[in-house]
Amino acid sequence: MTKTVLLVDVQEDRVSFSIVAAGDRPNGVRDFLCDSQDEMILSLRLAIDDLGASLDAAAFAAPGPVVAGAIQLTHAPLRLEQTRLQEALGVPDVRLVNDFSARALAMPLVEDCSLEQIGGYRLPGQAPAAALGPSGGLGVAILNPDGFVGWVASAGEGGHACLPAVDDRQSQVIAQLRRRDPHVSADRVLSDRGLLEVAGAIGQLDQAPCASTVALLLEAAQAGDAVAREAFQMFSQWLGVVAGDLALTAGARSGVYVFSPMILAWGGQFDRELCRASFQAKGPMSGYVADIPLFLVTEQHCGLLGLSTLFGTG
């Protein structure tokens, strides 16, 4: 008998979910906002009752490491607890997964029409792939072929590694950021809040005003504001640097996939050429990285898609 499964992707205070037969791709996705696990459970139970569903299993993805059967979200107060979810939903099979492990699992299932390739080549054969995604922070995961017919996702917290400076201007900006917090990580900078911090640092260096929200910064960049334009360019460059480092570390010959609705919303302010050039600028290993494709993923519900693989693929 086919199982009915609940797939849930939690991002800060926004929850997306789908109830499907095991192995099916997510469909009929619903979204809601919540601030606590109990509030989330109440909304899910109401939806389950409304659909008349009887669950056999559930999987939850959220940004943060799985520790002792729980995920404390990295940039939000919400905490997911496996035991509590099992009891409240009446489902013994509840799985907790780092959100970028889920996105890594989705990579082999993302259709070509949902991939924008930024340089490199589609290489034949099985090799590792890597996923990263700037949003409220920087998620990172690696997908490895298991030697048989499937893939294994490796969770990590690589986004919290220190951010490198590759030129003098970046060194100046990082020095400004250190005045607020000495740990300047990729997770801190390659995020929505980080973009504003970078813009503020550039404004301080140039003694020029800068926008106070991402929306206003985007509007200023589109109007030709120098501080705003440089902030988006520097972000694009740093994303390429970090993605290239990840490709080298993981041996990600199958590609590096960028999952980021935030970047998709920027349109042309995300400098693809600069990102690709920074991705490849790896000294004696530049030739190795030059072949690796960099993908911007436009599929909307990759977290749910990845979770669906935990119960078999359709």
Image (cartoon, rainbow, N blue to C red):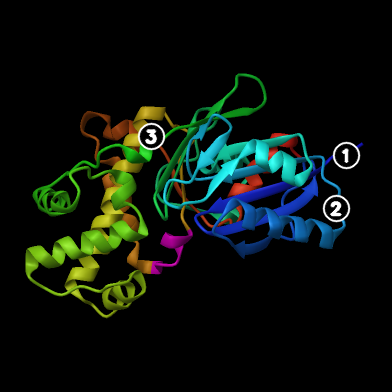
167 with respect to 256 (left or right):
left
Which residue is labeled 3 in the image? 247
Name above or below for residue 202 compared with residue 85.
Answer: below
Main secondary structure along the magenta-highlighted residues: helix
Please report the residue visible at 73 percent of the width from the left and 46 percent of the height from the top.
Answer: 88
Which residue is labeled 2 in the image? 53
Could you give the CA–CA distance between mark 3 and mark 2, rounded to whole angstroms? 42 Å
Looking at the rendered image, the disc whose residue lies closer to the viewer, 3 or 2, is 2
- The amino acid sitting under disc 1 is Thr
Residue 157 numbered mark, or none: none
Residue 75 in picture, x, y percent from top left:
42, 51
**Element under disc 1:** loop
- Mark 1–mark 3 CB contact (< 8 Å): no
Please report the residue visible at 24 percent of the width from the left and 35 percent of the height from the top.
Answer: 282
Query: Can you tell which quarter of the image residue 165 is in?
Result: top left
**Residue neighbourhood size for the residue with mark 1, other residues' Cα within 10 Å, grouped as few (<14), some (14–19), many (≥20):** few
284 with respect to 146 (left or right):
left
Residue 111 appears in the picture as rendered: no
Which stretch is magenta? 261-267
Could you give the CA–CA distance between mark 1 and mark 3, rounded to whole angstroms? 38 Å
Q: Earlier in the sequence, mark 3 or mark 2?
A: 2
Q: Earlier in the sequence, mark 1 or mark 3?
A: 1
Name above or below for residue 270 compared with residue 286.
Answer: below
Quadrant holding the N terminus: top right
Which residue is labeled 1 in the image? 2
Q: In this view of the protein, which residue sits in the foreground, 13 or 242?
A: 13
**Element under disc 2:** loop
**Element under disc 3:** helix
Q: In this view of the protein, which residue sits in the foreground, 106 or 278?
A: 106
